[in-house]
Image (cartoon, coloured by chain):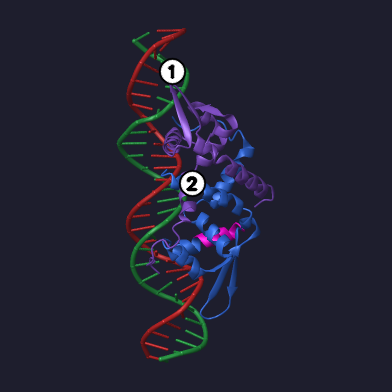
Chain colours: A purple, B blue, C green, D red
Amino acid sequence: MKKKEKICPEVATCSVDYAFKRIGGKYKGRILWYLHEHTVLRYGELSRTLPDITTKMLTQTLRELEGDLLIHRKVYHEVPPKVEYTLAPFGKELIPFITYLKQWGDKQMANGH
Amino acid sequence: MKKKEKICPEVATCSVDYAFKRIGGKYKGRILWYLHEHTVLRYGELSRTLPDITTKMLTQTLRELEGDLLIHRKVYHEVPPKVEYTLAPFGKELIPFITYLKQWGDKQMANGH
DNA sequence: TATGCTACATACCAAAATGTATGTATTATT
DNA sequence: AATAATACATACATTTTGGTATGTAGCATA
């Protein structure tokens, strides 16, 4: 049947939901992981590291991560343009979790799940 | 511009992508978390715990989690019906990571981010 | 003057995810 | 015979997300 009547009963637990929203999306996890592995990556390097992403989605995703203060964007005013991306403090705090998740994923994949 | 030429260059890192896909979706994180908190929940209890979910999405999401072996579904052949959901081993392995993420979310929310 | 380099922007379109509304099954109870 | 309880199923509509194709800026080099 339809919707529920009650409003959010356990306000605190919504932080799970909150967190998942910042790292959801098709590419955010990988972008954060690659920035962790390489420390600093230019736009074109990210594009080549994620071969399945389009420029539109890459730019869009990077802007969202930047807006959430998970990554930092440094622009060099040169021609041709140069922009470097790095993990911001809040993004770095997510690394242990992504590391753990990655290991879980490796294990799952190894067992064919 | 368009797509890239290269195929996936870093095969191993795709486990990040793999893992994110199993726990992605609008409600999976919360469902796993609530099952962890309550140990066992009936369908109706889950529905009341997630007041914003519809029966269609709840059922659909539970089936996906079950298919990925993250949760377990136990049916009691009674009338009216009774079905209990619990975390399966693979799902339990995700708890430390969801716990970490939840703490991160709590902190972010507390600071207004 | 044309082309290349790099990091995008943007209009339009397709696919995927989620929501709405309504229906079903079975047995006990009124 | 009608109603209640519980856990769904399902057709259809809408929203959200992602994809395609093409364009722009500005300077250097051929």
State the image coordinates of residue A24 (x, y, percent, origin top left). Answer: 48, 46
Disc 1, SS: loop
Residue A37 lies in quadrant: top right
Looking at the image, which residue is at 54% across and 57% down?
A: B33
On the same chain, marks 1 and 2? The answer is no
Q: Chain of mark 1?
A: A
Q: Residue at x 61, y 42 (%)?
A: A99
The amino acid type, in three-letter code, at marker 1 is Pro
Residue range of the region highlighted in magenta in the rendering: B61-69
- When asked about the image quadrant of residue D2, the answer is bottom left
Q: Residue at x 56, y 37 (%)?
A: A33
What residue is disc 1 on? A80
Quadrant housing the N terminus of chain A: bottom left
Q: Position of residue C3 (x, y in %)?
A: 43, 15
* Res B65 label: none
Q: Work out whether residue B38 or residue D9 is closer to the camera in this orientation and state it.
A: B38
In magenta stretch: residue B67: yes
Which amino acid lies under the numbered mark 2 shown in the image of this protein? Lys
Check residue A47 for magenta coloring.
Answer: no
Could you tell me residue B48's position as x and y percent?
45, 67
Q: Main secondary structure of the magenta part?
A: helix
Give the labeled residue for mark 2. Answer: B107
Q: Chain of mark 2?
A: B
Mark whose residue sits in front, 1 or 2:
2
